[in-house]
Image: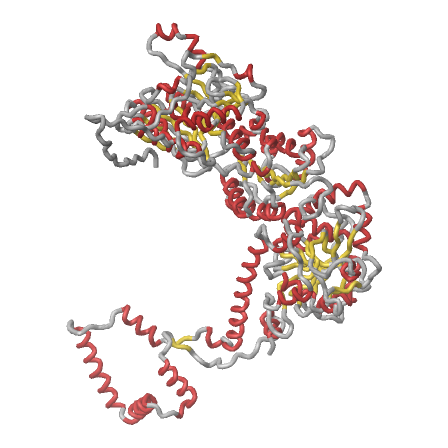
């Protein structure tokens, strides 16, 4: 009996076979193997078998018949013996539990084994094992299909980065691929449901017959027709095998019959146009390719069309252009697959969602454009046209039953692209498909918005990015269930940006989330769908405002597809419109560096509380910022309690406490040492108060002057804009940068003492320099370095003396804002002193800048001031540094490697030796080597 007959029997279409061995019984517990053999022999030999048990039974029957008195005596004696044994305490009787066990061991009863056909069961188990293996492979394929890699072959082919395969190469790809069958036997059935939508029944018989004769037979065949033609359809296919064919009547308008695919339970759906008869191995060929790593995440077919970006009114039909010789017969990316579509079941929801949004085209010949466009726009699934065997095309490819010079599909597409109103809609979505653009080379950026509120906050950034011709702008929304659909974006964006119409250069993707609540199901849904979009669009950058679980999902997606992700809190977006002035490559470094905050404090809890409060209220752009508080040995219990109880939510909080008294210089210098060249530190003392915008200023300046442009001369970024300078030995001098500078920033050699960002390379060099200088000053005093007319030259115990020396010798500069992002609180203890120096204190306590930032001036256009606040050029600063360096160091100048060695080479000195007599010979003095810096 074949497997098909067995399936029919299980389905109840055949009479049940007569059960054999119905008189057998089973014994519980099962007997041992030897006991089973004995029981089988007893069954075979029957009643005439001379078994000892049989002999005993015969003897008892004869005894009862021949001697009844003897039997009565025997029974009486047995009864007395039983009573005696029962009353004796030394003899153990079987308990109820023992009796029950004995009963179970000897009871014989029927079980289902006597009804089991073990031959059929073994066969079914083998099939079940094969089916399980197939199911596992299908499950693995599901995740592969729905999580395509950014550099998958199909995506690279759609971008034109790789060359496709010839027909013979495709055959070799599928040689090792086995079909995922749901049944074995003569006709292999595969997990495919074939759907035919027919409006005329003229060619239906040939079409269904072509499907039934496939080498890989679909598990189901559905024919969709209207109610009026249902009887005629059934009559046409009456002589064919109807076991797997089902006729469905639908009277929907337009192309809504496609919704039938939502009810498919098989792994694949094969939709076939009404005038197409597939070749005998067509399904097998496409199905095997769908399981290869190269084509598993692509919509495959042998009929397609290419929309040309340069000649918008022309259509290239595939395979017509292949056979004409204009194109080599290789697999290639196309704008649409026509005539038949093999779809993974996991792709169907994308089509259903598009149908619900009325995005489906009304004309039947444009069904391929709808399917290809929807899968690509919503799920990143490219359409790949495959070459066919030029000799046996009818065997491998498909045959057009109503063939003309050009198919109806190509005619409809040609008419569509000639419509000027439709061209912008069609071709603006082709920019990221690898098609050549008519404008300058562009780079894509992607915004993810989850709600209408998020969209309103991000709209200013979206509008500013859209105005840049070098950027392709993509907006991804979670869908209407999350509060924002693509239609809402299209309708509201023009008014938000001040446009009359929706900008054609903005491409909107609707993920259509299936969950209303923020839970892990939603997280997985975002992870899956957003991965597809990012894999295809491949943006340089993704910007979002998501928090909590959704943020976790988006961050995971960005790591999977290697796309930098920027999280912007909604309250910070209005302060970062300057992002649009930076290149996308610079913005992609947004998360590539860390900014740490280092605070040194002593016995001033009120001043520390003011500083911490201002730091808490600042904008941090969603970054993780670690805070370190370094308490001096003099800190009191109140300060320690404040530090311990302070809740820092922007990152890690580290606390250090010094146990010995130390000068201010090492406390400042040792507060931070960089772990990498992408770690920056803002060093503060407790006399400083911060503007809410201080971190945004630091972030913007680092991006602008370290990643957008770069100069070795820039060693830091000041938060403070001084109004008084202390570097002149003759006294303090007023300095008003706003009257001297055009713009919002300038360069000056002076290191800030009221809060600054220090760069890692220069800070390491300063550590090495001050280490060598203090060692020399406290030791051999081999080198004297003094900057002319600089007040700090006399401050041997101050860090400023040594940092200003290094700055002068290297011609380093620091970036200063024209409006201050920090201020100093000089708190004099005596009231008389506060009144006396009231005006001077006001010069240090500058107003804080709390507005947003305009575009920062380019580095080479920044005005430069020297240590004393006088205007200078970089060439003048370098000349001054080289002049002093030649006076204090004997080493030759080396290229800038942030190494102070060439500055720390003292010159040779003459040694005076006392002699008793003028004519005495000079003693030989041994050479003494001293290492000043190593």
Q: Is residue 327 above or below residue 873?
A: below
Determine the image quadrant of residue 207: bottom right
Q: Is residue 678 shown left or right of residue 670?
A: right
Q: Which percent across, then down, holds residue 744?
A: 56, 22
The front one of 29 and 106 is: 29
Residue at position x 64%, y 47% in the image: 378
Q: Is residue 260 visible?
A: no
Q: Is residue 113 above or below residue 623?
A: below
Tell me: 647 left or right of 337.
Answer: left
Quadrant where the N terminus lies?
A: bottom right
The answer to which of 576 and 880 lies nearer the viewer is 880
Residue 662 in sight in this render: yes
Determine the residue positioned at 35% across, 20% down: 795
Q: Position of residue 128 (x, y in %)?
A: 53, 68
Identify the image quadrant of residue 456. top right
Viewport quadrant of the C terminus? top left
| Scheme by which the image is coloured | secondary structure
Q: Residue furthest front?
A: 919
Nearer to us in this view, 825 or 520: 825
Looking at this view, name the residue that lies furthest to the right: 405
Above or below, 237 relative to 657: below
Q: Which residue is situated farthest in the bottom direction here?
A: 66
Count the marks. Answer: 0
Q: Quadrant of residue 418?
A: top right
Instruction: From the top left corner, tell me how far across and down residue 323 is, in percent.
Output: 78, 62
Q: Nearer the viewer, residue 414 or 778?
A: 778
| Image-based side of 367 in relation to 752, left or right | right
Q: Residue 521: x percent and y percent?
A: 52, 46
Residue at 31% in and 20% down: 603
Q: Is residue 477 left or right of residue 552?
A: right
């Amino acid at each position: 009996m074949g497997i098909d007959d067995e399936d029919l029997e299980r389905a109840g279409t055949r009479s049940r076979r007569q059960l054999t061995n119905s008189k057998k019984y089973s014994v519980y517990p099962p007997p041992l193997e030897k006991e089973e053999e004995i029981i089988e022999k007893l069954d075979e030999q029957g009643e005439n078998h001379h078994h000892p048990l049989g002999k005993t039974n015969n003897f008892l029957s004869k005894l009862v018949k021949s001697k009844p008195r003897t039997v009565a005596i025997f029974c009486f004696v047995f009864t007395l013996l039983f009573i005696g044994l029962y009353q004796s305490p030394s003899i153990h009787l079987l308990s109820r539990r023992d009796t029950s066990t004995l009963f179970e061991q000897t009871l014989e009863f029927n079980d289902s084994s006597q009804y089991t056909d073990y031959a059929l069961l073994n066969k079914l188990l083998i099939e079940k094992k094969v089916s399980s293996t197939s199911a596992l492979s299908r499950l693995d394929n599901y995740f592969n299909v729905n999580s395509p890699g950014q550099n998958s072959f199909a995506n690279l082919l759609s971008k034109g980065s790789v060359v496709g395969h010839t027909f013979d190469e495709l055959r070799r790809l599928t040689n090792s691929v086995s079909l995922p069958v749901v049944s074995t036997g003569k006709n292999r059935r595969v997990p495919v449901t074939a759907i035919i939508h027919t409006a005329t029944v003229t060619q239906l018989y040939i079409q269904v017959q072509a499907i039934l004769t496939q080498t890989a037979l679909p598990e189901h065949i559905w024919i969709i027709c209207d109610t009026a033609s249902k009887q005629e359809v059934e009559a046409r296919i009456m002589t064919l095998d109807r076991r797997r064919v089902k006729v469905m009547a639908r009277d929907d308008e337009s192309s809504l019959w496609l919704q039938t695919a939502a009810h498919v339970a098989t792994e694949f759906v094969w939709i076939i146009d009404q005038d197409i008869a597939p070749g005998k191995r067509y399904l097998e060929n496409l199905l095997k390719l769908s399981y290869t790593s190269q084509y598993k995440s692509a919509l495959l077919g042998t009929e397609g069309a290419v929309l040309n970006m340069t000649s918008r009114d022309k259509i290239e039909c595939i395979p017509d252009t292949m056979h004409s010789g204009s194109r080599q017969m290789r697999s290639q990316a196309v704008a649409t697959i026509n005539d038949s579509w093999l779809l993974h079941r996991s792709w169907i929801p994308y089509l259903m969602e598009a149908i619900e949004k009325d995005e489906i085209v009304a004309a039947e010949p444009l069904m391929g454009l709808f399917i290809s466009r929807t899968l690509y726009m919503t799920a990143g699934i490219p359409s790949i046209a495959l070459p066919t065997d030029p000799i046996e095309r009818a065997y491998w490819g498909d045959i057009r039953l109503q063939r003309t010079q050009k198919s109806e599909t190509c005619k409809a597409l040609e008419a569509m692209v000639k419509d000027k109103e439709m061209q912008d809609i069609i071709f603006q979505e082709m920019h990221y498909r690898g098609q050549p653009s008519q404008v300058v080379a562009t780079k894509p950026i992607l915004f993810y918005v989850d709600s209408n509120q998020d969209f309103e906050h991000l709209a200013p950034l979206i509008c500013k990015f859209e105005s840049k011709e070098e950027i392709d702008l993509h907006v991804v929304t979670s869908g209407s269930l999350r509060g924002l659909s693509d239609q809402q974006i299209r309708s509201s964006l023009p008014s938000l940006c001040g446009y009359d119409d929706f900008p054609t250069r903005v491409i909107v993707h609707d993920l259509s989330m299936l969950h209303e609540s923020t839970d892990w199901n939603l997280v997985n849904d975002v992870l899956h769908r957003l991965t597809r979009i990012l894999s295809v669009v491949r943006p340089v950058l993704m910007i979002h405002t998501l928090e909590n679980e959704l943020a976790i999902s988006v961050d995971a997606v960005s790591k999977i597809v290697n796309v930098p992700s920027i999280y912007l809190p909604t309250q910070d977006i209005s302060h970062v419109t300057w992002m649009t002035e930076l290149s996308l490559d610079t913005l992609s470094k947004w998360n590539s560096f860390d900014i740490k905050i280092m605070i040194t404090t002593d016995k001033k809890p009120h001043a520390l509380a003011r500083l911490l409060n201002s730091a808490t209220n600042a904008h941090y752009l969603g970054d993780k910022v670690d805070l370190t508080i370094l308490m001096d040995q003099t800190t009191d219990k109140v300060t320690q309690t404040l530090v311990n109880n302070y809740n820092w939510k922007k990152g890690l909080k580290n606390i250090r406490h010094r146990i010995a008294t130390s000068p201010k210089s090492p406390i400042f210098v040792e507060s931070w040492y960089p772990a990498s060249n992408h770690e920056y530190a803002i060093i503060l003392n407790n006399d400083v108060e911060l503007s809410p915008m201080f971190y945004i200023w630091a972030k913007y300046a680092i991006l602008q002057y370290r990643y957008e442009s770069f100069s070795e001369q820039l060693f830091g970024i000041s938060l403070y804009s001084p109004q008084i300078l202390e570097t002149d030995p003759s006294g303090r001098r007023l300095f008003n940068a706003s009257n001297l500078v055009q713009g919002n920033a300038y360069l000056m050699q002076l290191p800030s003492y009221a809060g600054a960002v220090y760069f890692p390379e220069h800070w390491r060099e300063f550590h090495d320099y001050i280490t060598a200088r203090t060692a020399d000053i406290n030791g051999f005093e081999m080198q004297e370095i003094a900057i002319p007319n600089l007040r700090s030259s006399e401050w041997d115990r101050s860090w400023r003396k040594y940092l200003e020396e290094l700055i002068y010798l290297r011609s380093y500069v620091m970036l200063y804002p024209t409006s201050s992002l920090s201020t100093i609180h000089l708190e004099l203890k005596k009231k008389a002193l506060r009144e006396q120096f009231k005006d001077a204190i006001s010069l240090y306590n500058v107003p804080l800048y709390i507005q947003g930032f305009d575009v920062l001036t380019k580095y080479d256009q920044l005005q430069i001031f020297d240590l004393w606040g006088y205007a200078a050029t970089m060439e003048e600063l370098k000349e001054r540094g080289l002049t002093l360096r030649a006076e204090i160091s004997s080493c030759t100048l080396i290229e800038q490697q942030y190494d102070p060695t060439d500055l720390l080479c003292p010159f040779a000195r003459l040694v005076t030796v006392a002699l008793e007599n003028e004519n005495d010979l000079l003693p030989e003095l041994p050479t003494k080597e001293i290492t000043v810096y190593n």
